[in-house]
Image (cartoon, rainbow, N blue to C red):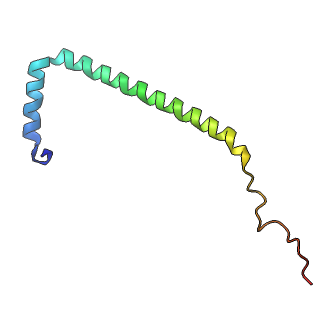
Amino acid sequence: MLSNIGPVQLLIVLVIVLAIFGTKRLRTLGSDLGSAVKGFRSAMNEAEAESAEKIGDQSKDADFDNTPVDEPSKEKHT
């Protein structure tokens, strides 16, 4: 359905949108959308930092320094 839309059709849609809303309203809408995206990105970065911090606190449970392969064998080889 959208594969038939070309540059000419997009230009016509842009002209119609400019005629309906005007350049000032579109400029305001663009800046509002930009600030919303910036706010969303900063909130996502904060959430990732908090989750990474929580994961870092929980990672103390496992100790992989001494695996069964690294531990000395309890059986004596004669």
Q: Residue furthest front?
A: 75
Front one among 27 and 76: 76
Please report the residue visible at 11 percent of the width from the left and 43 percent of the height from the top: 5
Q: Quadrant of residue 33?
A: top left
Q: Is residue 23 left or right of residue 69?
A: left
Q: Which percent across, then down, holds residue 24?
A: 19, 15
- Judged from this view, the residue extending furthest toward the top is 24
In percent of the image, x 73 and y 44: which residue is there?
60
In the picture, measured across the screen, residue 66 lies left or right of residue 74, that is left
Is 76 left, or right, of 68 in this rendering? right
Q: Looking at the picture, does residue 38 appear above or below residue 24?
A: below
Q: Is residue 41 above or below residue 60?
A: above
Point 72% across, 50% down: residue: 62
Q: Residue at x 11, y 36 (%)?
A: 10
Depth order, front residue of 76/44: 76
Residue 59 horizontal side relative to residue 2, left or right: right
**Which of the 4 image quarters holds residue 52?**
top right
Quarter of the image with the C terminus in it:
bottom right
Give percent across and percent down for residue 3: 13, 48
Residue 22, how many percent across, how many down? 14, 17
- Indicate the position of residue 18 as horizontal and vertical percent values: 12, 22
